[in-house]
Image: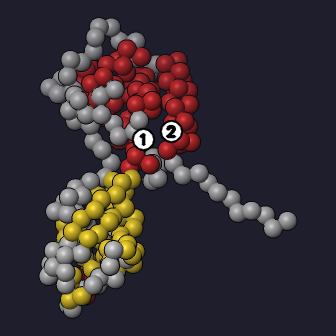
Amino acid sequence: MNFLEIVKRAWVESGQSGDGPASVVGMSGHQQRFVNWVRNSWSDIQRSHEEWSFLKSSADCTLTAGQETFQAAALGIADLKVPLNVFILIDGKWAELGMVISFSASSDYSRLNKESGQPKIAYFSNGILSFDTVPDAAYSLRIHYRKVPQELSANTDIPLCESMYHMTIVWGAVKRYAQSDEDQALFNAANAEYRRCILEMLNALTPKIKFAESAF
């Protein structure tokens, strides 16, 4: 389902009359609230777990020789939230770079970039990638990364997770409606469906916990 279809489904599941919003844009009043409830439901689902598989990706890019810092968007990775691994192609083989990540408002890593050469360590802060040296050639990189959470905005926007899990978003929105309407029976029913759906997502779309084998 796309964004508009999910809104319409939430409208139906919450027991509203009529067809629901004709668009997710330009609505007002009760219909706009449904649009917001669906948008916020998807946002909360994405932020509920750091390891969703649909929020991980990889991309190949090429560095510019002599350039000290690189904006993620300029490298063609506009949805990059944080790198997980960075590899550099050397003599036809991928080698993993060391990684230092800072979430501070500013970074002094750029001052380390004084000499030119082959990068050995990647630094990431505030959407900017830099290295322990200024690249002396157009090195190829492969970056595995966590995506910025998706925000639904247009009618045809489709959530990143597989369609079989879109009902989780629907039930999350219905819960919000039920809370707003103080409908405890509907809230309980929607919450039960939401918990069932989110558990299915967690089981299928997050890493399995592995326990060390006992020595006995």
Q: Nearer the viewer, residue 119 or 150?
A: 119
Can you name the residue that lies furthest to the bottom here? 115
Q: What residue type is labelled 2?
A: Met
Q: Which of marks 2 and 1 is nearer the N terminus?
A: 1
Image position of 74 with respect to 37: above or below: below
Q: Name the residue under label 1.
A: 45
Q: Which of 119 and 45 is in front in this view?
A: 119
Q: Residue 78 location, x and y as percent?
A: 22, 56
Q: Residue 60 location, x and y as percent?
A: 28, 62
Q: In this view, does 133 lie to the left or right of 86?
A: left
Please give the name of the residue rendered at 27% of the width and 15% of the height, measured from the top-left corner.
20
The image quarter containing residue 116 is bottom left
Q: Is residue 184 left or right of residue 6?
A: right
Q: Is residue 210 left or right of residue 86?
A: right
Q: What residue type is labelled 1?
A: Ile
Q: In which quarter of the image is the C terminus?
A: bottom right
Mark identifier at residue 201: 2
Inspect this view and state whether residue 184 appears: no
- CA gap between label 2 and label 1 equals 10 Å
Please give the name of the residue rendered at 30% of the width and 59% of the height, measured from the top-left corner.
59
Q: Is mark 1 on a helix, strand or loop?
A: helix
Give the colouring mode of the picture: secondary structure
Q: Residue 63 location, x and y as percent?
A: 20, 72
